[in-house]
Image (tube, rainbow, N blue to C red):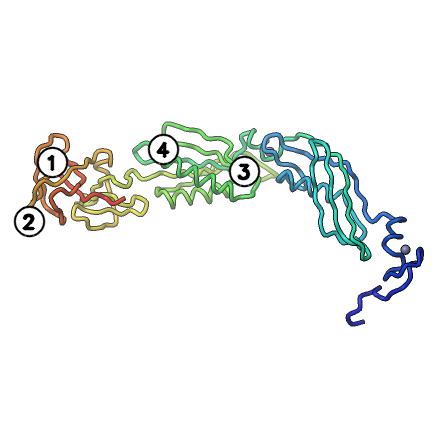
């Protein structure tokens, strides 16, 4: 039988006598039998809040509609479908366009359907509306207010994680801004854990975890987990005292700073002594081998500072005083 499909031998159609590979030719078969079945009454559950529709789970409306219509359509195994398209005409009707092949004949059908859409809030939207949460992500800062930029960056990381997840509990059900920081109520605990770690990695700080009994389900205790991220007190551009060294923080997340000579150090036990807002820009008016003269930005008086780096007259530097003693740092490159 090599190279020969079943039924390829020529014979005569039992009905019309035309030459065919089959007992009954396509034309005669189609006159007598239907090769498909379609129930043209389509019901679709639609969420009024997010616009998703239901078909074995909540999904994009077009996908759910296509699946529902496909389920209402069945066909003869000899009908080989090459194209199946759904076209909506208006809110409650549409057509399906089918192309294929049956017993060597190209066939196409245009079949109308009626669509009944029923509004029903999906599981995810009703949980969001009900304030459901398994976890809280808390953003805090050590001895200072949390900054707008930190909130925005953390929120972006949460949003990205939610967007990437296809878990139905991947949502924020509530955001509470407190004096001490911001709380995000997160539907899915695993997502909260993952994103809390991500925030810690990207923004620096210390992550702690605490859990609280929230109830029982199927005989098991249910806990709500709070992930608290406490950002470091010092930020890029702040000045810290670390042992005997005065350092300008160059990377708060990685714990790095430079001394007035520009030499890099890893921060060990840094204590904040000046915020970046307190540092002022000034410039060098004169210098010799051991001393540089700068203008005190407040008084505009010339101040002498020990020369620790390779400066030129006119160079811009960052100036601050610790207990009346002036310090200058080479300006950080952004
Ligand atoms: Zn025939
Ligand atoms: Zn919804």
Which callout, 1 or 3, points to the residue nearer the camera? 1
Q: CA distance from mark 1 to mark 2?
A: 18 Å
Dots 1 and 4: beta carbons under 8 Å?
Answer: no
Dots 4 and 2: beta carbons under 8 Å?
Answer: no
Q: Is residue 204 left or right of residue 278?
A: right
Q: Is residue 146 left or right of residue 136?
A: left
**Which image quarter is the N terminus in?**
bottom right
Considering depth in this image, is 163 or 126 the residue closer to the camera? 163
Dividing the picture into quadrants, the one containing residue 12 is bottom right
According to the picture, the residue beneath numbered tag 3 turns out to be: 222
Q: CA distance from mark 3 to mark 4?
A: 34 Å
Task: Report how many numbered discs are placed on residues in the image.
Answer: 4
Considering depth in this image, is 155 or 22 the residue closer to the camera? 22
Q: Of helix, strand and loop, which one carries label 1? A: strand
Ligand 2 shows up in the quarter that is top right
Which callout, 3 or 4, points to the residue nearer the camera? 4
Please say if 193 is above or below 6: above
Mark 1 or mark 4: name the one nearer the start of the chain: 4
According to the picture, the residue beneath numbered tag 2 turns out to be: 289
Mark 1 or mark 3: name the one nearer the start of the chain: 3
Q: Is residue 124 left or right of residue 257?
A: right
Mark 2 or mark 3: name the one nearer the start of the chain: 3
Q: Of helix, strand and loop, which one carries label 3? A: strand
Q: Of helix, strand and loop, which one carries label 4? A: helix
Q: Residue furthest front?
A: 18
Q: CA distance from mark 1 to mark 4?
A: 33 Å
Mark 4 or mark 2: name the one nearer the start of the chain: 4
Which callout, 4 or 2, points to the residue nearer the camera? 2
Checking the image for residue 148, the label placed there is 4
Q: CA distance from mark 1 to mark 3?
A: 63 Å
According to the picture, the residue beneath numbered tag 1 turns out to be: 295
């Amino acid at each position: 039988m090599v190279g020969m499909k079943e039924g390829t031998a020529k014979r005569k159609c039992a009905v019309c006598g035309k030459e065919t590979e089959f007992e009954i030719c396509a034309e005669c078969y189609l006159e007598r039998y239907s090769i498909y079945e379609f129930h043209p009454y389509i019901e679709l559950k639609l969420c009024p809040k997010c616009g998703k529709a239901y078909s074995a789970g909540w999904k994009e409306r077009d996908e759910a509609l296509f699946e529902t219509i496909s389920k209402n359509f069945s066909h003869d195994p000899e009908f080989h479908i090459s194209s199946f398209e759904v076209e909506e005409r208006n809110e409650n009707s549409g057509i399906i366009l089918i192309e294929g092949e049956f017993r060597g004949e190209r066939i196409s059908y245009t079949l109308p359907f009626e669509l009944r859409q029923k509004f029903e809030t999906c599981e995810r939207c009703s949980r969001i509306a009900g304030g459901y949460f398994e976890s809280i992500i808390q953003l805090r800062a050590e001895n200072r207010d949390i900054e707008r930029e930190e909130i925005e960056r953390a929120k972006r990381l949460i949003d990205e994680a939610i967007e990437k997840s296809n878990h139905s509990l991947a949502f924020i059900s509530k955001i509470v801004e407190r004096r001490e920081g911001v709380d995000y109520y997160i539907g899915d605990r695993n997502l909260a854990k993952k994103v809390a770690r991500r925030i810690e990695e990207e923004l620096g700080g210390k992550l702690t975890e605490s859990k609280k009994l929230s109830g029982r389900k199927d005989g098991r205790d249910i806990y709500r987990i709070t992930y608290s991220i406490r950002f470091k007190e010092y930020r890029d551009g702040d000045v810290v005292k670390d042992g005997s060294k005065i350092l300008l923080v160059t990377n708060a997340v990685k714990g790095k700073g430079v001394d007035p000579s520009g030499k890099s150090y890893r921060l060990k036990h840094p204590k904040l002594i000046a915020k970046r807002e307190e540092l002022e820009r000034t410039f060098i008016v004169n210098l010799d081998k051991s001393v540089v003269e700068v203008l005190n930005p407040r008084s505009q008086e010339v101040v002498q500072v020990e020369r620790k780096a390779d400066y030129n007259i006119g160079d811009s530097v960052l100036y601050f005083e610790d207990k009346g003693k002036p310090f200058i740092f080479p300006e950080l490159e952004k």
